[in-house]
Amino acid sequence: MTARTAVVLLCSLLLLFEHCHGAATDIALDAKAQYMHRVDSLNLLLYTFLLTITVLTVWAFKHWRFRFLHETGLAVIYGLVVGAIIRYGFKSSNAIQHLSVVPLDPSYYNESDPIPDTLWFTSTGVNKTFSYSFRGEISKQDNEIDKKATFDPEIFFNIILPPIIFHAGYSLKRKYFFRNLGAILMYALVGTTVSSFIIGLLMYVFMQLIPSLSSSFTFLDTLYFGALISPTDPLTIISIFNDLHVDVNLYALVFGESVLNDAVAIVLSGAIQNYGEHYVTAGPNAFESVAFLKALGNFVSIFSLSLFIGATMGCITALMTKFTRLRDFPLLESALFVLMSYSTFLIAEASELVGIVAVLFCGICQAHYTYNNLSPDSRQRTKQLFELLNFLAENFIFSYIGVSMFTFPKHQFDFGFILSGFFCALLGRAANVYPLSFLLNLGRKPKIPMNFQHMLFFAGLRGAMSFALAIRNTVSEARQAMLTTTSLIVILTVIFQGGMASQFLSWFNIPVGVDEEVEAIQYNGVRSSGGEGGCGDLEIRRERNFSYNSMQEGSASGSFGPTGKPNEKALLARIWGNFDTHYMKPLLTHSRPTLLETLPVCCSPMARLLTTTQQMTQDDMGDKIDSDSDLYEEDQEMERRRASQQPVSYHQANLKYTVNPCYQPNSTEPTNNRDEPYVILNVNRR
């Protein structure tokens, strides 16, 4: 009996010991989890603090009208300061624990085999298997803060970039964008491709001239660098353009190019990767015509299909908001708008396409069609929401660029590659702007003046897209050198080029203070040679109103060319504007004319089904909510207004009139003295 009791007691002690050992392990794991939670909170607090300081400094700069440094430059500088503090001034008491693991069979894995995604570690002591995810090649990281201050690159592509790109399309001033559509497409599509290949070719030549780098970089590596460094992100320039009210045509060229070349760059970089991975068989430096044609077809198909998905999702959202009464519930309407827009990005990515391209054109379609169907509350909410998300995401990225210069463990400072990268980036930008501007001016009326071309060159700042492409893959030393060079180019261009934007405008004699609706006002002007009003003195009126012709040197005729006609939009814009007004907008919005008026009689049943009661009952002119979208009707309305306006004398007191803002009457009382100078007024005769 005593022996049995002793055995039971011994077993109880063993179970108690095992339980205590398990409890101790759980306590240690809980302590580790709490510590990691504090580190995560400190990391998020760090970037929240950076954004808060940036916002306050931006307010101070705007209050004192200090334009020598933009908010993105501030975010980068603050990020550099905080990154240096983390790297050299902050030491964690809890170092990262490492466990070295080697395969039992040395021949089990070599460099030719694919890298495993996970590693299973079996501990014989506790009889458990733990899974570890692949992070990359081993690099030095002193503490947990260094590790946590570095984000997964997929966060940039899946969470941060989509709202930035969507806002670019949603806030696009389509009226001026389509009027300069040919030039924008030339700069964004042809120019970005030419710039990428020129940078890639020159970088490869320079790498061959540097013995220490000749074996590290293949031609595909330098070509990929050319693709990722070519897109521009002139957020600083555009913000200053808005503050100073720079000419809308220059604004459209700079902003339109930057919107589209981001999409072109990401598709082009993907095509270059596919060329190297799937098509080339003779080596990374060999050129194969068949492989090149396959990669080119891959580029065109991916871009086109991504564009189609984005436009289709935008049109589906427009139909949903048109034929439902979601506008009665603005919160649900706004939620649907956001979810449909973000799902566009995910659908494209899941289909092995490019979500950035899809969400860009989804934003353009949402602004062009869906916006007109939304309730007033949803219009205001969506505009402000994406403007806020864009501001926070952009400044977060630039803050992170500054912080990562000190905390990211895979920077490779090859000064030969860095200097070559700066030089080739400038040459690539020049090859994008000046030769293509010359070709455009051969057939373009009005022409792009040289001062606009200089401003386009200096507006080529690098930003979020270049950094996101560079940080996505940093396994090899070549990619690490690309990341370091890209980060430095982004930092220096944002701080110095962005900070000197106002000075560039002054040096190039580009007028500021031009109202956004300058072209609409100029359409109402009258030539000084008599005709359309017959008053030669109106030349003074036009010069004092808006004397600068934004797109034609040596002319003081406002938006009129030598023939006195308004600046014509691009041919594609005119064709699309006509089709859009008669078919797309009546289908997707409540605008007039309806499909019953534009479709053939044989299609009347279908047209009646697609026409809402609101379309049938509203006025002929419709609800002019979004003036930017009325590309075709707007020109016709401007022509009618211009033809109906006649100059009359201030002496005619029986007419209702409004004083031209550029002409103030000398007296408030009418006079009968016909010799006294009088004010030219506009009276609409309809």
Image: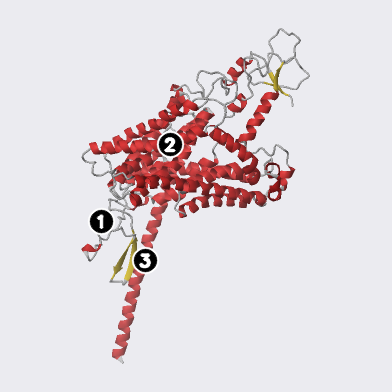
Sequence-earlier tag: 3 or 1 = 3
Which residue is pictured at 33% across the width and 47% down the height? 408
Return the x and y of residue 304 as percentages of the image width and height: 48, 46
Mark 3 falls on what kind of element?
helix
Q: Which residue is mark 2?
A: 190
Mark 2–mark 1 distance (CA, rounded to whole Å): 39 Å
Question: What numbered label is drawn on residue 27?
Answer: 3
Which residue is pictured at 31% across the width and 41% down the height? 222
Question: What numbered label is drawn on residue 111?
Answer: 1
Q: Amino acid at mark 1?
A: Glu
Return the x and y of residue 278 as percentages of the image width and height: 35, 52
Quarter of the rendering occupied by the N terminus: bottom left
Return the x and y of residue 27 as percentages of the image width and height: 36, 66
Mark 1 falls on what kind of element?
loop
Please tell me which residue lies in front, 41 or 402: 402
Crowd class of label 3 (few under 14; some 14 to 19; many from 20; radius 10 Å): few
Quarter of the rendering occupied by the C terminus: top right
Cβ–Cβ under 8 Å for marks 3 and 2: no
Residue that lies at the very extreme toward the right in this rendered image: 654
Sequence-earlier tag: 3 or 2 = 3
Instruction: From the image, state whether disc 3 or disc 1 is nearer to you.
Output: 1
Instruction: From the image, state whether disc 2 or disc 1 is nearer to you.
Output: 2
